[in-house]
Image (tube, rainbow, N blue to C red):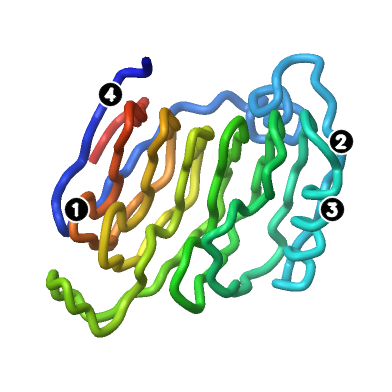
Amino acid sequence: MKPVHLLLIGATMAAISCDKDKDKDNNNDNGADKEDFGAGATVDNTFNVGSDTQWNAAVAAIKNGGDDKNYVINLLGDFSLPWSTEPTFGNLAGIKVSIRGNKKIALTSNGHLLRVDYDQTVILRGAILEGIAGNDVLDVFFIDGNYFSLVRVVAGELTMHDGEIRNNITHIWGGGVYVSSCGSFTMTGGTISENTAYSGGGVRLDDNSSFTMRGAIC
């Protein structure tokens, strides 16, 4: 059973910010590959993505690539994506996907922007994930906003080294990140801010899930 390291409850949560000292090796691809996938591991494919069309093509290729693979998605431009409640990378097991680059991916309609499922790992290195901000009124009858958390982790692993998860208003649990079913979220850098939910504005944990932060917290 995994311990719950930190449970953040409340409708609207102030920004969570976390930073860590990074050695120079982590600023290049080789250093990031080693940290994300392990020493000696290989990257099975790298995708350069600057539009929704390129993102969809990369996701489709990953879904068709099979279990136990390592992938890098380099973000080269800002773009928007429609809603989804399905696992972003399908039902594959043992995959690791590192999303890199200080570019924005914005959600355009109700749903998750990113969903990490059983035995999957997603690493965020700089991505700005932006949700749907609407009427910030905590009532069962929301007029605007989103019905879902911006990022959903179900028995998978999410690691955030840098970037932002921001501006999502959900009618239910976990405005920024919702982790359940023994999933885990590790945050060593970046910011979670301006998210609102009925419970767990920034991060919501359920079902023996864990949230670990390392470094200075503001």
Look at the image and tell me in which quarter the N terminus lies.
top left
52 to the left or right of 155:
right
Q: Distance between the residues labelled 2 and 3?
A: 11 Å
| Earlier sequence position, callout 1 versus callout 3 | 3
Q: How far apart are marks 1 and 2 (CA)?
A: 39 Å
Residue type at mark 2 is Asp
Residue type at mark 4 is His
Which residue is identified by label 4?
5
Which residue is identified by label 3?
61
User: Residue at left 20%, top 41%?
Assistant: 8
Residue type at mark 1 is Ser
For residue 44, which numbered disc appears in the image?
Answer: 2
The x, y position of residue 190, in whole percent, is 42, 45
- Tell me the mark number nearer the camera, choosing from 1 and 2: 1
- Tell me the mark number nearer the camera, choosing from 1 and 4: 1
Q: Distance between the residues labelled 2 and 4?
A: 33 Å
In front here: 118 or 184? 118
- In contact (CB < 8 Å): disc 1 and disc 2: no
- Tell me the mark number nearer the camera, choosing from 2 and 3: 3
User: Residue at left 32%, top 32%?
Assistant: 207
In front here: 142 or 7? 142
Taking the image as drawn, is residue 186 in sight? no
Which residue is identified by label 1?
199
Quick one: label 1, few (<14), some, or many (20+) residues within 10 Å? Answer: many
Snapshot quadrant of residue 195: bottom left
Instruction: Note whether 105 is above or below 41 in the view shown.
Output: below
